[in-house]
Image (spheres, rainbow, N blue to C red):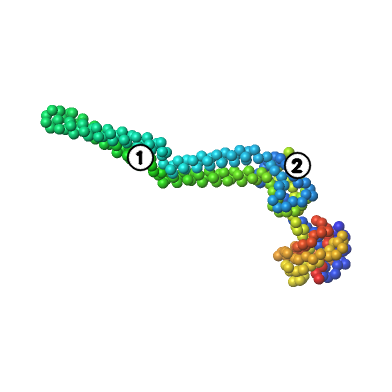
C-alpha cells in the first residue's frame, strides 16, 4: 500500500494530498469487575445513547444496597426518637408519680405540723419532731425530682445529641447513595449512539475492571488524516473547506479542517515517497459529515477547492 500511495502522491496536483480514514473507537468496559450475565448487542448492532450494552452479576451490590437502606431507616428512627422526646405513655407514668408524690407531701406536711404542735406542748419528743420534719423534706424533694423529670421528658434531646443523630442520618444516606450507584453500574449503557464494531467477551465470561467488553463506533467518528508541509500551513487552517474522495465514491464530499498539529513530525510511513520521506510535516484532521463510502484505513484524496 505504501508504494501505491507514494506513486499517487507524485501525480497529485499542488492543491491535493493523499490522506487516510481514521476512526476514534469507544472501548466500553465496566468500572468494577464481575461475571457477564447478558449482552443484548452483537457486532453490527445499532445503539442509541442510554441503550443497555451488557450487564454484570449484581448479587453482592444488591445485598449491599439493601443493607445500606436498612441503616438509613435505623438512623432516621434514632434521630426522630432523640428529636421528639419521651413517648406519651412514659410522660403519663411520670405524671402519675408526681400525683403520688404530691399526695405524700400533703400527708407529711400535716404530720409535721401536728408533731410540731405536740412537741411545743411537751407531748412529743424531739426525735419524733425531727423524724416528721425529715419525712416532710424528703417528700418535697421527691416532688421536685419528678417535676424535673417530666420537664426533661417533654423536651427533645440535647442539641449536641441531635447533631450527632443527624450526622448519623447523613452518613447512612451517603452510604446508601454509594451502594445504589455501585448497583446501577452493573448495567452498562451506551454513552453515545453508534454501531457496535467488535465484541471481546461473551455472557458467562469474567470481565476485569476497565477491561473492554466491546468496541463502539460512534456516529460521525470517522475523520480524515493528512499531512502538510510548513509552507502549506497558511492555506490549511482550522475551518478550511476541503473535498474528500475515495476510489469507491462517485463524487467527492465536503469536509472541514478541525485540527492542525502544533508540532512537526517526520512523514509517516503510510505516505512515504521519494519526495517527502525526509520532510517535516504537520498532521491535519478533517471532519466529514457524510461518511458514506468511507471505511477505516481507506486512502482518500483531499483537495482544496
- Quickly name the residue at label 2: 202
| Neighbourhood count class around disc 2 (C-alpha, 10 Å): few under 14, some 14–19, many 20 upward | some
Residue 36 vs residue 108, the one in the foreground: 108
Q: Is residue 230 above or below residue 104?
A: below
Q: From the image, tell me which residue sits under label 1.
A: 150
Residue drawn 63% across the image and 38% down it: 60
SS at circle 2 = loop
The image quadrant where one finds the N terminus is bottom right
Q: Quadrant of residue 56?
A: top right
Residue 118 visible at all: yes
- Left or right of 56: which side holds 43? right
User: Residue at 33% of width from left, 34% of height from top?
Assistant: 97
The residue sitting at 83% across, 62% down in the picture is 300
What secondary structure is marked by label 1?
helix
1 vs 145, nearest the viewer? 145
Return the mark for residue 175: none
For residue 39, what is the image quadrant? top right
Rendered location of residue 163, percent (x, y): 45, 46
Q: Is residue 244 above or below residue 87?
A: below
Asked which quadrant contains residue 251, the reply is bottom right
Give coordinates of residue 2: x percent, y percent: 85, 59
Residue 97 relative to residue 163: left or right: left
Q: Earlier in the sequence, mark 1 or mark 2?
A: 1
* Disc 1 residue crowd, few under 14, some 14–19, many 20+, Cα 10 Å: some
Residue 281 spot, x, y in % from top left: 77, 65
Q: Nearer the viewer, residue 275 or 185?
A: 185
Left or right, 76 with respect to 126, comes to: right
Amino acid at each position: 500500500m505504501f508504494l501505491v500511495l507514494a506513486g499517487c502522491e507524485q501525480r497529485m496536483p499542488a492543491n491535493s494530498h493523499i490522506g487516510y480514514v481514521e476512526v476514534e473507537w469507544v472501548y466500553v468496559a465496566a468500572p468494577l469487575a464481575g461475571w457477564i450475565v447478558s449482552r443484548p448487542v452483537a457486532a453490527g448492532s445499532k445503539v442509541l445513547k442510554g441503550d443497555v450494552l451488557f450487564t454484570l452479576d449484581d448479587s453482592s451490590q444488591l445485598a449491599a444496597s439493601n443493607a445500606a437502606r436498612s441503616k438509613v431507616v435505623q438512623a432516621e428512627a434514632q434521630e426522630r426518637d432523640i428529636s421528639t422526646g419521651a413517648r406519651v405513655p412514659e410522660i403519663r407514668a411520670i405524671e402519675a408519680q408526681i400525683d403520688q408524690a404530691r399526695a405524700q407531701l400533703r400527708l407529711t406536711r400535716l404530720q409535721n405540723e401536728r408533731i410540731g404542735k405536740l412537741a411545743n406542748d411537751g407531748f412529743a419528743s424531739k426525735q419524733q419532731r425531727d423524724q416528721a420534719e425529715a419525712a416532710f423534706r424528703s417528700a418535697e424533694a421527691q416532688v421536685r425530682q419528678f417535676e424535673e423529670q417530666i420537664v426533661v421528658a417533654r423536651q427533645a434531646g440535647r442539641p449536641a445529641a441531635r447533631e450527632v443523630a443527624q450526622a448519623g442520618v447523613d452518613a447512612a444516606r451517603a452510604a446508601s447513595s454509594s451502594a445504589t450507584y455501585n448497583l446501577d453500574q452493573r448495567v452498562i449503557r451506551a454513552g453515545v449512539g453508534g454501531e457496535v464494531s467488535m465484541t471481546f467477551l461473551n455472557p458467562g465470561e469474567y470481565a476485569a475492571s476497565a477491561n473492554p467488553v466491546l468496541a463502539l463506533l460512534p456516529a460521525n467518528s470517522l475523520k480524515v488524516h493528512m499531512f502538510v508541509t510548513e509552507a502549506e500551513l497558511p492555506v490549511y487552517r482550522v475551518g478550511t473547506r476541503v473535498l474528500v474522495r475515495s476510489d469507491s465514491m462517485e463524487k467527492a464530499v465536503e469536509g472541514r479542517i478541525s485540527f492542525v498539529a502544533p508540532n512537526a513530525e517526520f512523514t509517516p510511513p503510510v505516505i512515504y515517497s521519494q519526495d517527502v520521506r525526509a520532510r517535516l510535516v504537520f498532521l491535519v484532521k478533517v471532519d466529514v459529515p457524510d461518511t458514506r463510502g468511507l471505511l477505516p484505513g481507506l486512502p482518500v484524496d483531499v483537495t482544496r477547492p
